Amino acid sequence: MPAKAKNSLLWFYGVVAFFILFALVPDHLMPFPAFTRRSQFIILILWYFISGREQARYVRQHFPNGYVKKKWGKPLFIGFGAMIAYLIYSAVVSLIYDKFGINS
């Protein structure tokens, strides 16, 4: 299973990198503006068919009665912190673009 775990981690890093770059590139420089507006949904669909479906199948096969659920506090705290960090990052990039007159 280590290869599949590594694959999931690569998906995570790829999505994080995509959103960091997405915030850096002004809209008028995007090669496919319609794609970038729908990118979150497209990434979700790609992840499901490339990796997520196999994970769901594994859980159904190895935990037929369900699995022991863990508490949500820590993941929600980390997710909320990451969201705030991304909003701050996006605001800083916007301020820098505004300061230097880069149109977005």
Image (spheres, rainbow, N blue to C red):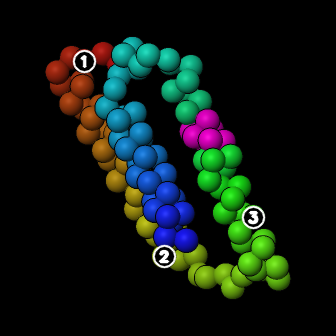
Name the side, left or right, on which 87 lies relative to 35.
Answer: left
Circle 3 sits on which residue? 57
* Residue sitting at the far bottom: 68
Name the side, left or right, on which 8 lies relative to 13.
Answer: right
Q: Quadrant of the C terminus?
A: top left
Circle 1 sits on which residue? 102
Q: Amino acid at mark 2?
A: Lys
Q: Where residue 23 sits: x, y (%)?
A: 36, 34
Asked whether 72 or 44 is in front, the reply is 44
Name the side, left or right, on which 63 lies relative to 35.
Answer: right
Q: Is residue 42 magenta?
A: yes
**Label 1: element kind:** loop
Asked whether 17 or 60 is in front, the reply is 60
Q: Where residue 67 sits: x, y (%)?
A: 72, 81
**Of discs 1 and 3, which sits in the foreground?**
3
Q: Is residue 45 magenta?
A: yes
Circle 2 sits on which residue? 74
Q: Is residue 69 visible?
A: yes
Tell me if residue 99 comes above or below residue 7 in the rendering: above
- Identify the residue shown where x is 21% and y is 30%: 96
Tell me if residue 22 comes above or below residue 5 in the rendering: above
Q: CA distance from mark 1 to mark 3?
A: 47 Å
Please state the extent of the stretch shown in magenta in the rendering: 40-46
